[in-house]
Image: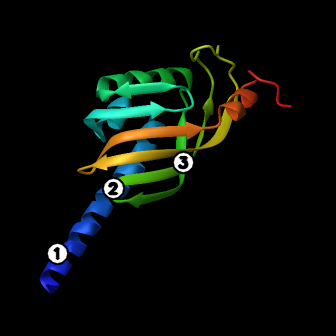
Amino acid sequence: MAITGTMRAKEDITTMSSTDTALREWAAAWSAGDTDRLASIFTDDCVYEDGTMGVLTRGKAELTAFADGIFAAIPDFAVELSSRFTAGPWAGLEWVMSGTHRGDLPGLPATGKPFTLRGASILELSSGRLARCTDYWDMVSFLKQIGAMPSQ
């Protein structure tokens, strides 16, 4: 029994390590503006949802197309992790997103204005990779900061 417990502990540490690496890499890939790097941490049949923008992508090709659009509109896009947790195959992230709105987004012509806002993501993990990610962030704060909505 003791051997099984020891083996189990090592397995948990390995899983935690690969999960932590995947979560950190998620933020690093977004911050680097690197769609190939981002896609590499997802499963081939991944689902990526930006709940705020109403975007749902399926598979790496759709994910990279979505990310390319974000990077074209916000070339200095950055994500800084504030906190994270894991629970079995699930993980949660709190983060701060920032950048400058230099290119058009759907329905939002470029303003050239910077923004910084908080958000959160819920992720499903599979064999050390991300199978699903859903992002939630504050569109009203974004619109106010880029001047597309009155700040009052």
Residue furthest to the right in view is 152
Category of crowding for the residue at label 2, using alpha-carbon neighbours closer than 10 angstroms: few (below 14), some (14–19), many (at least 20): many
Number of numbered discs present?
3
Secondary structure at numbered mark 3: strand
Tell me where residue 98 appears, x and y as whole percent. 61, 37
**Up-down: is 106 above or below 40?**
above
- Quarter holding the C terminus? top right
Q: Earlier in the sequence, mark 3 or mark 1?
A: 1
Relative side of 9 to 89, left or right = left
Which residue has dot 3 on it? Answer: 80
Q: Quadrant of residue 41?
A: top left
Q: CA distance from mark 3 to mark 2?
A: 17 Å
Q: Earlier in the sequence, mark 3 or mark 2?
A: 2
Which residue has dot 2 on it? Answer: 19
Viewer-nearest of discs 3 and 1: 1
**Up-down: is 149 above or below 128?**
above
Relative side of 116 to 63, left or right = right
Tell me where residue 56 appears, x and y as whole percent. 43, 26
Tell me where residue 122 appears, x and y as whole percent. 46, 46
> What amino acid type should be assigned to the residue bearing mark 3?
Glu
Which residue has dot 1 on it? Answer: 7
Relative side of 86 to 51, left or right = left
Q: Earlier in the sequence, mark 1 or mark 2?
A: 1
Q: Residue at x 52, y 25 (%)?
A: 54
- Circles 3 and 1: CB atoms closer than 8 Å: no
